[in-house]
Amino acid sequence: MRGGSLACGALLLLSSAVPAAAQARGAPQREGRFRIGPLRVTPRIELRNAGVDSNVFNTTVAAVPDTSVVLRTQLDGYMPVRSRLRLFGSGYTDFNYFRRETTERSTDFGGSGHAEMALGPFVVFGGGGGGQARQRVTIDIDERVLRQEKSAYAGAETRVGSRIVLWGQGSGVVSRYGRTFSSAGDAFRLARGLDRNTLTASTELRLRLSTLTELVGRGEAVEDRFLKQRDAGRVTRSYRVLGGFRFDPLALVSGTLLGGFREIPRSASGSVPPYRGPIFVADTSVPLFGRARLGITGQRDVVFAATGADAREGRLRNTYVSSRVSGLVELGLPLDLRLRAGAGLEEARYILPYTLGARTVRRADHLYSVNASLLRQIGDSLSVGGTATFTRRVSNFATSSYEGYRYGLTAELRP
């Protein structure tokens, strides 16, 4: 009976969905902890933090502390169908508990599915996903707001000769933002600024330079259609052009490094300000001294702001240039201990000014974070330990600055 429940749950996961970027094509890194016929599944329970949050509402003064618990359950699935078709799936549920601040409690969930099949010289693929969470989704949203998202994608790739791969994909994302915990007026402004449908057409050319390195060129055309706006300005079209390198996991430096530019032309900017400037994407890791590994991630791009621009600009919404970089070191220690330590910096520079008293100011926020976890492995399935995180935001809008820390116990169980 228990095996049948696992099989049904995994099949449901394989039919659910998530954005294309979250799915790595090719063979899975792990084929599954358990096998049920052709189906391979990996269940997981993760206690992300059980301890203290010193600033539940991210306020500048009179910070409110509380005891909080974040628990995640997850199930990953993989199933090959004969020799041509492969199915991947994943689903999770997060339980967020606060002892006194009951309005901050939530149950978040999401799922994803991906399928790919070889058809002659092509590999075709598709999938999609969805989820709902009540979290802080961007640097300029301080409250935990309800966000619902659905997505779908489809595409194909083919090899030209022995060194060139051509890849193309079309995707769509539907984003909805629900109420905040402060007022209905804030909820309406948030939905007016961020509720949208996003369509993206992407193409990529990869040239193999060596057995471990590829040269990558990528182009994207993006259309954002804002749902709470009814005039012609509700549609914004923009473009991304990126180039760089992709390194095999067996290379000394593995991952992806891409740089380029993002353009929102004035003629197609709709109700957001036009923009043209540099962007980048980095997701790399490198081994250190045989016992540790350093991971570096980063991204720079234009993001839609949750707060509208000055009405004198004649626009309904603002944007900001988001630049993020973070590093994480994992180090194996004696006694089956594992140390994880990281730091991050995020900058948000708003393109249109805001009114601050009698002045107009171009808002700029900087978010700093450091974190560390010490875990001990117990057997093959369980790790337990402690974790601590400190976060500080500095803004030229004084009321938008805050700091806080979280610390507590953490554990992960993979049966």
Image (tube, rainbow, N blue to C red):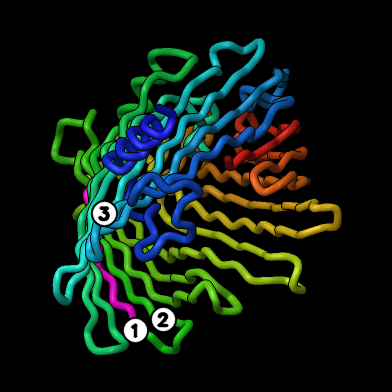
Are circles 2 and 1 on residues that touch, CB within 8 Å? Answer: yes
The x, y position of residue 326, in whole percent, is 62, 56
Q: Earlier in the sequence, mark 1 or mark 3?
A: 3
Secondary structure, mark 2, is: strand
Q: Earlier in the sequence, mark 2 or mark 3?
A: 3
Q: Is residue 103 above or below residue 43?
A: above
Tell me the residue that label 3 is attached to: 115
Name the amino acid type tagged 3: Ala
Residue 277 included in the magenta stretch of the image? no
**In the figure, residue 124 lies in which quadrant?**
bottom left
On the question of residue 315 being in view, the answer is no
Tell me the residue that label 1 is attached to: 207
On the question of residue 115 being in view, the answer is yes
Q: In this view, does 141 lie above or below 217?
A: above
Numbered disc in front, either 2 or 3: 3
Secondary structure, mark 3, is: strand
Span colored in magenta: 199-206
Name the amino acid type tagged 2: Glu
Which residue is the extreme one toward the right?
334
